[in-house]
Image (cartoon, helix red, strand yellow):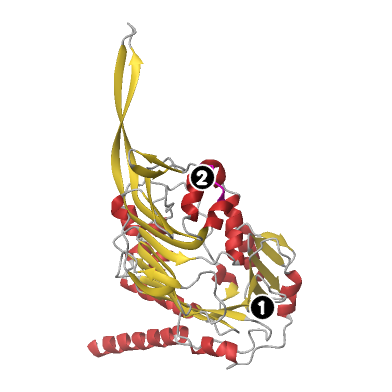
Amino acid sequence: MKRKIVYTFISIGVLLLTLYLFRYKQGQAFTDRVPNDVTAIVNINIRQLEHHILLDMLKHPMPYFRPDSKPKDTIKKQSFSIAKGVDVPANILFFTNDDALRNTWCSTVFKVDDVEEFSQYLVAEEFEKDGEIYRKDNLVFTLKDRQLIIAILYDKAAEVSETIQAIFNETDFLPEGSSLLKSIEESTSDICLATIKHDFFEANFKDDLFEIRGKANSKFDLFVSTLQPKLDKNTIAAAAGKINKKHPLFKVILQKIKRSKFDRTTHLSIDSIFNAWNGSLRFNLKSIESKTDTIITYEYDDDFNKVEKVTTQELAVPKLMVQLEDETPRSLLNYFKGKNAIQIFEEDTLFTAIPLYKFQVTSDMDQLKIYTRRGANKELSKKEISKLKGYLNIENYNQNPHKFSFLSIEHSFFEIVKDASIQVSDDNEFLLQINLKDKSRNFLGQYIKPSL
């Protein structure tokens, strides 16, 4: 009897191992999937992402099976069920080029097991149906003869139906082992990107860490190489970089700022500020502290006697420093003084364009520092030449007064994040890291099903 039980457990174990290996160790497919004229490819290793979630579920089942806290009479929205109608492959490839697919990413062709069920799902998800095409915001699904292509558009109004139809009929594909596909085929990462200019980036969900790293060999000139300080990580947020003011993307950002209420709020010209600024920025939000302000007002009683009324108000005051470098010596200082945005009160030089907080100002021949508290005005030692550095400590921010509106972090995902950092080196090596508070679980599992 005991021997029979042992054999049963061994048989079940072998069966589960076989299913596991068949499901999660099968190779990815690249042959006859990507058109020959593409300039960039993204590969998403679906089986590996599933594997992350499976192991996280086995190690930590409670967050996945814990009942929802919604009222019983709440109408349940249809859950994501793309797998019911689509034969999801081991890996998904998206691609683009500089011609017909400019500003558009298209997927390789999927097989559709149940066209009617999948069509019903898309309609239920509020996609607008027009024949074979289903559109919602910047996402387009095209169904044809039990096949599916997904398109992601930069411009949601763009017309791509003819281009997608051509992909269905494509016969000229990149051969396996081609220069563009080779780096992707050799990668073991969860997600990777390669371009014909030999840019290559990899993204991975490593336990409590999500990381994107790689190198841009093509021209990457939004930021300019300069001597940067080592960022202070005993803080809420810090950044250092020098923007290339001639870059087209910066000009787009500038136009968006112009359309904001900046000029009307500060009575300053954003164009004049950028003309006086050389693009270099250092920023440090050290902390957010509670401050009680006493407000004294006067009222009159029934006998018309003047009565003092004292009230208090709780304020969240940032310990903040912003450092800008001048295009020419003292150009920023002279502009702000000319607009009366910098004034002297009781031996303090103050930046008065933003009256919400008391900003103090110091300046030398090539840089202007604006800060709320002297403790934030700390000169950090210069360490290396780089293009961009940034750090954000969500955990520190969540421990500070939430009435402070400088950072708008309200999504539930940010409740599980510890910190995030980004760096672009002088030779265009890129590194983005997001760390979660719970180090025992996989990042992807926590992102999909945050602990309640």
- Residue located beneath label 2 in the image: 338
Q: Main secondary structure of the magenta part?
A: loop
Height in image: 402 above or below 177? above
**Identity of the amino acid at label 1?**
Asn
Residue position marked by numbered label 1 in the rendering: 97
Quadrant including the N terminus: bottom left
The correct choice, above or below, for 58 with respect to 334 in the image is below
Between 337 and 178, which is closer to the camera in this rendering? Answer: 337
In the image: residue 425, left or right of residue 152: left
Q: CA distance from mark 1 to mark 2?
A: 49 Å
Rendering quarter of residue 163: bottom right
Q: Nearer the viewer, residue 386 or 127?
A: 386
The answer to whether one can see residue 403 in this image is no
Q: Indicate the position of residue 373 as horizontal and vertical percent values.
A: 31, 49
Q: Which residues are magenta?
A: 266-270
Residue occupying image coordinates x 30% and y 89%: 7
In front of the other: 363 or 442: 363
Mark 1 and mark 2 residues within 8 Å of each other at the beta carbon:
no
Q: Position of residue 292 (x, y in %)?
A: 28, 37
- Up-down relation of residue 84 to residue 48 (above or below): above
Q: Give the left or right position of residue 426, taking residue 256 as reference.
A: left
